[in-house]
């Protein structure tokens, strides 16, 4: 059984209201009493499961968010779409975003802690989590409420929302197989224990499920030049694959550059469905970014029932079929 507010109050020798004040309005509690309650919280391992109580009662009604640096080689980023969806969903709940920058994960946490202590933000949205990400544990240690877009592999202690990346590449692989392709390659970035590996996993598992030997598994930086180079390697093979699933639209666009330059025939599916995909008539997996933004705000502001774990959502993507995924 998870410890309750009553358990903390009993251990600290205070009232339930005092515990609530320590969690939501610590300035109202005498320092020695606050220290006693915090010690009881740490000893019992108590974790509030009604985050929204503190958020809705706060004066700032601001949610912190670190602006991600722009990838110099990417054609387009889903980051802007996510940020817009987040702001739109927050506004509907009378909450707004406070944006800040940081050089790295440590700086992001330090900035969030400072803003939270100053009362400038009530909570934080983390973007782009990965396996072993140090940010969730650091924020929990400083008692900064947050929800995460992405997973770390140990996600039981905070709300999170993610896209089912493996399902996206699985749909792309199945679509190509249904079109008659029997040797399907994959192009992604180097193993990362997170999103990139899940996208490779969806392709690999679906090939196995359909009884298809997986084509070459090529990895490299997420750039047009790398996509073009990987395509050249595939086409130079004496027995080249007839189709390829890529981890991003950037890699897919690079692949198409080489395919068109050589007048070759190779079915291509990208991932993210950026505006570039539509311009290039590129089939691509569309992430439900707008739904993810709204789900993030809901995870922060709509509490679970007493005793339930923090909310977690895994959203399915959609495959958008265009002219690039041709038959062999």
Image (cartoon, rainbow, N blue to C red):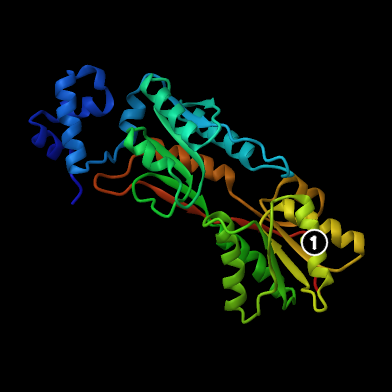
What residue is shown at x 17% (from left), y 41% (from top)? Answer: 43
Residue 196 x %, y %? 59, 57
**Above or below: residue 144 compared with residue 130:** above
Q: Which residue is mark 1?
A: 324
- Foreground pick, 97 / 184: 184
Question: In this rendering, does residue 234 appear at all?
Answer: yes
Is residue 13 found left or right of 287 in the rendered image?
Answer: left
Q: Is residue 326 above or below residue 108?
A: below
Question: Is residue 259 positioned above or below 115 on the image?
Answer: below
Apparent side of residue 18 relative to residue 184 in the rendered image (left or right): left
Q: Residue at x 50, y 50 (%)?
A: 130
Where's residue 133, x and y in %? Answer: 46, 46
Q: Secondary structure at mark 1?
A: loop
Q: Is residue 17 visible?
A: no
For the point 68% across and 69% down, the residue is: 175
Residue at horizontal 83 percent and vertical 78 percent from the top: 238
Residue 96 spot, x, y in % from top left: 49, 26
Indicate whether 77 appears above or below 116: below
């Amino acid at each position: 059984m998870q410890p309750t507010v009553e358990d903390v109050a009993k251990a600290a020798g205070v009232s339930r209201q005092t515990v609530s004040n320590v969690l939501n309005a610590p300035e109202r509690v005498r320092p020695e009493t606050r220290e006693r309650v915090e010690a009881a919280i740490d000893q019992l391992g108590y974790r509030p499961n009604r985050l929204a109580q503190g958020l809705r009662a706060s004066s700032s009604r601001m949610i912190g968010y670190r602006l991600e640096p722009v990838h110099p080689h990417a054609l387009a980023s889903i980051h802007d779409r996510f940020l817009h969806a987040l702001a739109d969903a927050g506004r509907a709940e009378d909450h707004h975003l406070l944006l800040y920058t940081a050089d790295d994960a440590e700086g992001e946490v330090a900035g969030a802690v400072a803003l939270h202590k100053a009362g400038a933000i009530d909570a934080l949205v983390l973007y782009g989590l990965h396996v072993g990400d140090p940010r969730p544990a650091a924020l929990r240690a400083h008692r900064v409420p947050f929800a995460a877009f992405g997973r770390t592999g140990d996600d039981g202690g905070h709300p999170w929302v993610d896209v089912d990346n493996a399902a996206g590449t699985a749909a792309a692989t199945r679509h190509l197989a249904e079109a008659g392709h029997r040797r399907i390659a994959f192009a992604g970035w180097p193993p990362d224990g997170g999103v990139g590996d899940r996208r490779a996993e969806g392709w690999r598992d679906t090939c196995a499920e359909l009884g298809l030997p997986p084509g070459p598994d090529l990895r490299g930086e997420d750039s047009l030049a790398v996509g073009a180079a990987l395509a050249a390697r595939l086409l130079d093979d004496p027995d080249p694959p007839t189709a390829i699933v890529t981890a991003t639209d950037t890699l897919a666009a690079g692949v198409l550059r080489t395919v068109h330059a050589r007048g070759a025939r190779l079915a291509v599916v990208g991932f993210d469905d950026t505006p570039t995909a539509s311009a290039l008539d590129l089939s691509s997996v569309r992430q439900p970014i707008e739904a993810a933004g709204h789900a993030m705000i809901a995870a922060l502001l709509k509490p679970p029932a007493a005793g339930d774990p923090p909310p977690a959502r895994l959203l399915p993507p959609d495959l958008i079929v265009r002219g690039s995924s041709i038959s062999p």
